[in-house]
Image (spheres, rainbow, N blue to C red):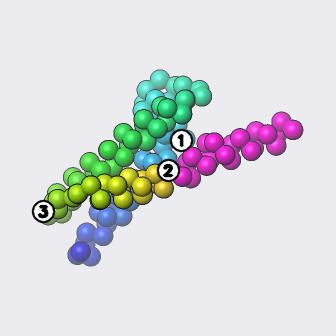
Amino acid sequence: MAAGHAVEVWAVILFALIAANLPFINERLFIVGPRRAPKAFGWRVLELLLMAALTFGVGVLLESSIGQRQPQKWEFFAAAGCLFVTFAFPGFIWRYLRRSALRESAGG
């Protein structure tokens, strides 16, 4: 990989990190839709899947702009999906574990 392409790689990683946590820190449907308070877990999972697809699309576009796009098999998508879910872990912890603990300590 050329040194000039490192910026594109880090841009996709940063985009994935932000996109993976958006469903857990935002109460709007699909980030711009109507506000749901509290938003159901199913909506958050659906948004997470759509954000993963969007991130893969951004990665494909950047890879195509760098040069020839490499064909990927299912192993790549399985590993990338696991990485995306791992990136979503801080948002999940904040939404479901940390905020619940804060509410319990404030109420009790």
**Residue at the front extreme?**
74
Residue, disc 2: 88
Query: Within 10 Å of the Cα at label 2, are there few (<14), some (14-19), or many (20+) other Cα atoms?
Result: many
Whether residue 18 is visible here, answered yes or no, is: no
The Cα atoms of the two marked residues, 1 and 3, are separated by 35 Å
The residue singled out by tag 1 in the image is: 24
- Of all residues, the one furthest to the left in this rendering is 68
Magenta residues span 88-108
Q: Earlier in the sequence, mark 2 or mark 1?
A: 1
The quadrant of the rendering that contains the N terminus is: bottom left
What residue is at 43 percent from the left and 26 percent from the top? 33
| Residue 28 as seen in the image, left or right of residue 73 | right
Relative to the observer, which residue lies in front, 34 or 102? 102
Q: Is residue 100 magenta?
A: yes
- 3D distance between C-alphas at marks 2 and 3: 30 Å
Amino acid type of the residue tagged 3 in the rendering: Gln
**Magenta stretch: helix, strand or loop mostly:** helix
**Of helix, strand and loop, which one carries label 2?**
loop
User: Does residue 85 sit above or below 37 in this rendering?
Assistant: below
Q: Position of residue 71 (x, y in %)?
A: 17, 59
* Numbered badge on residue 68: 3
- Above or below, 9 relative to 54: below
- From this viewpoint, is residue 95 visible? yes
